[in-house]
Image (tube, rainbow, N blue to C red):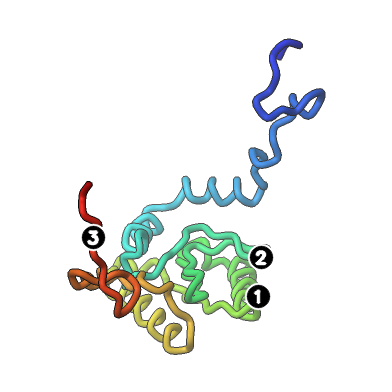
Amino acid sequence: MNRRQRPLTGAVGLRALLPHRRYVVAPRTLAARRMRISMNATERLIWSRLRDRKVDGWKFRRQQPIGPYFVDFYCHSARLAVEIDGPVHWDEARGAYDMRRQAWLEAEGNRVLRIPVSEITRSLADVIDTIDGVLLEQEQLGFGRKPGLSGQPHPPASPGTSPQVGKSYVSPSPL
């Protein structure tokens, strides 16, 4: 940047040459992005069924950082963490780490659902039904979706009514 060029932000001096704070990405965010890119085939298969509120309107996030840990899939409104357990998790040291992580997540008020890869390959529909059942249990405990996001379309408004209950709406006449 030469002397005559001014940055669009209005900053001058050294501040003009440094990237704006909002462009600096946190290391945990970068790690989560790397994990999202490098998901294995089983995780991609589960994600294809969980994304876009496909499970009864519940929103899931993938490779979500929570505290010092990352979870495979997380539904924030139900506080449900879904973990896929593959061969990597069968190691004794990794199993101890998974138990510590699960204990920490549960102490923070989250429910952890661990699903073995063998269950997913055997019957994906049963796994999705299990996740849906746990979400219903969480909903009965008081966790809920945001209003209007139940996966069901809104009923159409009756003609001639405004969004305000009981007041009629008259469209303005064209001039």
Find the residue positioned furthest to the front: 175
Q: Which residue lies most toward the left here?
A: 159
Secondary structure beneath dot 1 equals helix
Q: Which x, y percent locates residue 148?
A: 35, 71
Q: Nearer the viewer, residue 125 or 149?
A: 149
On screen, 165 above or below 174?
Answer: below
- Residue at image position (26%, 68%) is 169
Give the structural element (helix, strand or loop) at label 3: loop
Whether residue 148 is situated above or below residue 68 in the rendered picture: below
Three-letter code for the amino acid on which mark 3 is drawn: Ser
Earlier in the chain: of badge 3 and badge 2, it is 2
| Residue 122 visible at all | no
Asked whether 114 or 156 is in front, the reply is 156
| Tag 3 residue | 171
Relative image position of residue 170 (x, y in whole percent): 23, 65
Image quadrant holding the N terminus, namely: top right
Amino acid under disc 2: Gly
Report the disc number at residue 67.
2
Asked if the residues shown at circle 3 and circle 1 are in contact, with their CB atoms under 8 angstroms apart, the answer is: no
Going by the numbered disc 1, the residue's amino acid type is Trp
Q: How many residues crowd around disc 3 within 10 Å: few (fewer than 14), some, or many (20 or more)?
A: few
Q: Position of residue 21 (x, y in %)?
A: 70, 40
The Cα atoms of the two marked residues, 1 and 2, are separated by 9 Å
Disc 2 is placed on an element classified as: loop
Task: Tell me the quarter of the picture where residue 60 sits.
Answer: bottom left
Q: Is residue 95 left or right of residue 144?
A: right
Which label number is shown at residue 104?
Answer: 1
**Residue at 64% over, 51% down:** 28
**Gap between marks 3 and 1, in whole Å?**
56 Å
